[in-house]
Amino acid sequence: MPIDEIHAKEVAETTRQPTDVSRRSLLRGATLAAGGAVFVATTMTAQRAEAKMGQTAAAYQSTPKDGQSCANCGLFEAPSTCRLVDGQVSPAGYCRFFVKKG
């Protein structure tokens, strides 16, 4: 067999078509995609956890209910904020998420 034919055969065997995908590149791409998905999910969860609920959604009222008030709630942060409810809240206020300090 002439050298030109041998060389052409070797080139044809070692040259990949654009549609050929190696196992290594497939696994690398899958790993990057999975890592990206985990990163996005973690970021979205953290942002969601930092968001507070509106006063209407929490059924907040500026007066106590059945002896329960924000001043006695474990979520209240003096002087006028709550870990769960957005905006200023009164120490004498109440919402449906009342948790007795303990």
Image (spheres, helix red, strand yellow):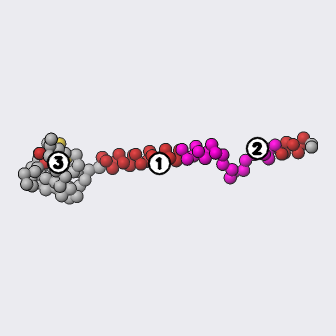
Write down the residue under mark 1.
Answer: 37
x then y, percent, for residue 49: 31, 47
Instruction: State the image quarter where residue 66 is shown.
Output: bottom left
Judging depth in this view, the residue of 13 and 50 nearest the camera is 13
Is there CB contact under 8 Å for labels 1 and 3? no
| Dot 1: element | helix
Query: Is 16 contained in the magenta span?
Result: yes
Most frequent secondary structure within the magenta stretch: helix
Determine the CA span between mark 1 and mark 2. Answer: 35 Å
Name the kind of residue labelled 2 in the image. Answer: Thr
Does the rendering let one see residue 80? no
| Dot 2: element | helix
Write down the residue under mark 3.
Answer: 99
Which residues are drawn in magenta?
Answer: 10-31
Determine the CA span between mark 1 and mark 3. Answer: 35 Å
- Left or right of 13? Residue 56 is left
Write down the residue under mark 2.
Answer: 14
Determine the CA span between mark 3 and mark 2. Answer: 69 Å
Seen at 17% across and 44% down, the residue is 74
